[in-house]
Amino acid sequence: MYLHGTMTINEAGHLEIGGVDTVDLAKKYDTPLFVYDTALIKERARAFKQAFEAEGVSYQVAYASKAFSCIAMYQLAASLDLSIDVVSGGELYTALKAGVEPGKIHFHGNNKSHGELEMAIKAGIGCIVADNFYELELLEELAANMEQTVSVLLRLTPGVEAHTHEFIATGQEDSKFGFDIASGQADKAAQIAERSKFIDLLGVHSHIGSQIFETEGFVLAIEKVFNQLQAWQEEFDFVPRVLNFGGGFGIRYVEGDKPLEPETYIREIVKETKKHADRLGLAIPEIWIEPGRSLVGDAATTLYTIGSTKDIPNVRRYLSVDGGMSDNLRPALYDAKYEGLLANRAHDKAEETFSVAGKCCESGDMLVWDMPLPEVQHGDVLAMFCTGAYGYSMANNYNRIPRPAVVFAEDGADQLVIQRESYEDLTKLDLAYQANVKETSDV
Ligand SMILES: *Cc1c(COP(=O)(O)O)cnc(C)c1O
């Protein structure tokens, strides 16, 4: 079994993460429980940063916080000198509350509201990644009213879409995000931004996909971005100060996933950027990237307690856990695959195959279809690996299941960073039904 980060199996045959026995964690905090290996997060952040430093270019590594957002995570990211990407007022609020320096926050999204943009400009965040014409209009109006200049990147749709092993190049990308290059939308957006007194156009952004295992998609996107920059250079002497090539760096979820080292992605991105900048006679702009999954994805493990089992002879053996699509939507949403083991009997041979079911009232609430495991017993602790990205952040209250707790584990110590939701929390926003609402509202 492939063990991630600091995982080990101790003398008792228990899975340890960050030097902490996960069976003890399950007892102490109950299950389902997310356990983050923070040493692994730190190692990844360092690897990305050192790769840029080795290339001798100016850079920012921004944590795409939609992957996992909470106060402690923002504080950890800030302590690692990462910038922060947010995609909503809620993420922005949490980052600010965590004490993240506003200048290091970048705001993404295809439908930022008037209120969200106002909040961002008031806070003085580092940059807004403008996605569409409506947003440019709103920004212009807000900035003028507030008599403030806003730093902006234009999100370009380069017509390159990368997924794991393949990438698809399309003439005009069909995407809800960004200004399309091929149809001239990007050109028009740049003209609007350049004309504006209140918009300071720093440069451009592109993000080509997620869980990418190759560098070809980035190479192709960089070429398309520079072709656009060349046109702007000719049209209005535009000099980009920032080029943001997004995130999407892959991780190993299951056997067969072969991500590249952070250095490999960065070396290639820097090399291509230098090549094209030289071609246009431009100074090398600051290069930004936005890893989400590759910073936190394989750093977390979800611990579940096994409850009921169901054997259908010659068909399938099911085991059910005390969570499911309420704490991990990815299998239902993307058919995502996971590996794991029994945390309390990690040395036991996996001789059986079980399908891991969640407890939600949906047949589609299956976490793993075929997981090799030893013969399981009620009360065993199932550890499911690589749940750190888009796990807790997509957690929900379907079936009124409270959201799990989250702990950080490192150097033999654990700390609770998100409390388990209580039944009381679940009804906190509910108001009582009023049978005679007309009468009461009339008085
Ligand atoms: C989601 C997203 C990221 C992060 O993607 P990962 O696959 O988690 O690295 C980065 N940039 C943008 C614009 C995104 O939408």
Image (tube, grey):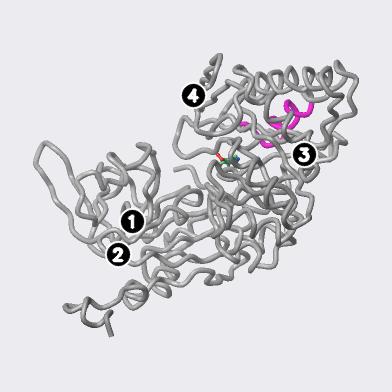
Residue 427 at x, y percent in the picture: 32, 74
Secondary element at tag 3: loop
Tag 2: amino acid: Ile
Front residue of this view, candidates 90 and 248: 90
> Alpha carbon of mark 1 to alpha carbon of mark 4: how far?
31 Å
Query: Ligand 1 near label 4 (Cβ, under 8 Å)?
Result: no
Mark 4 Cα within 10 Å, few/some/many (few <14, many 20+)? few
Q: Is residue 154 left or right of residue 334?
A: right
Mark 3 highlights which residue?
196
Query: Do the residues under discs 1 and 2 have CB atoms within 8 angstroms?
Result: yes
- Of badges 4 and 2, nearer the viewer stands 4
* Residue 406 shown in magenta: no
Mark 1 highlights which residue?
326
Mark 2 highlights which residue?
401
N-terminal label among 1 and 2: 1
Residue 377 at x, y percent in the picture: 23, 59
Front residue of this view, candidates 106 and 369: 106
Query: Do the residues under discs 1 and 4 have CB atoms within 8 angstroms?
Result: no
N-terminal label among 3 and 2: 3
Tell me what residue is drawn at x 28 percent, y 61 percent. Answer: 322
